Amino acid sequence: MSDCLFCKIIKGEIPSTKVYENEKVYAFRDIVPQAPEHIVIVPKTHIESANDITPENSSAVAAIYESIPHIAKTVGVDRDGYRIVNNCGKNAGQTVFHIHFHLLGGCMGGKMY
Ligand code: 5GP
Ligand code: ZN
């Protein structure tokens, strides 16, 4: 998707602070962090939202979950814990329509739900 912000970040057309990358996944620091450690994890393939996950593309989402332990360790939150958040659609406040998972860690004030 040529006009997608996260596709541009993946391609390096827009700079980002990378924390992890493999064949299927790219992870970078959120530009407006909502926690001491706030990482955005995206598949390298363009999927708009959780509504668009299918048997054909779900391996991209699995790859994200497989990358989470590495990312959590890299930013130093694996022992104390963290939250993984996916916002789907306007009522959840999704602003970038390339599926992504927020890893939120550091000093968090308990559960939010
Ligand atoms: P959403 O609100 O869709 O769940 O999450 C989108 C996230 O992308 C937001 O937390 C926002 O701060 C982050 N974001 C938006 N534009 C940029 C950018 O250009 N660079 C980085 N690193 N993060 C961005
Ligand atoms: Zn995209």
Image (tube, grey):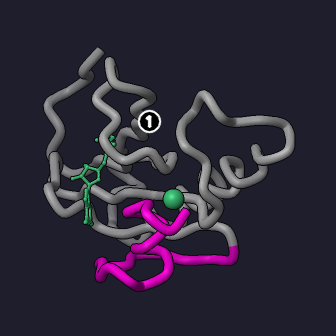
The reply to whether the magenta stretch includes residue 8 is: yes
Q: Residue 17 at x, y = what percent?
A: 29, 79
**Which residue is at a point 36% across and 69% down the rendered structure image?**
28
Q: In the displayed image of the protein, which residue is found farthest to the right?
A: 56
Question: What residue does disc 1 label?
Answer: 86
Residue type (three-letter) at the residue carrying disc 1:
Asn
Residue 86 occupies quadrant: top left
- Give the position of the N terminus as an image quadrant: bottom right
Quadrant of the picture in which ligand 1 is shown: bottom left
Label 1 crowding class (10 Å Cα cut-off): few <14, some 14-19, many 20+? some
Ligand 1 within 8 angstroms of badge 1 C-beta: yes
Task: Decide: is 86 above or below 29.
Answer: above
Q: Which residues are magenta?
A: 1-23
**Which residue is located at x 16 percent, y 54 percent?**
33
Q: Residue lying at the far top in this picture: please name it.
A: 113
Q: Quadrant of the C terminus?
A: top left
Name the foreground residue: 51 vs 2. 2
Instruction: From this view, report whether residue 53 is shown above or below residue 11.
Output: above
Residue 57, given in percent of the width and then of the height, sits at 77, 47
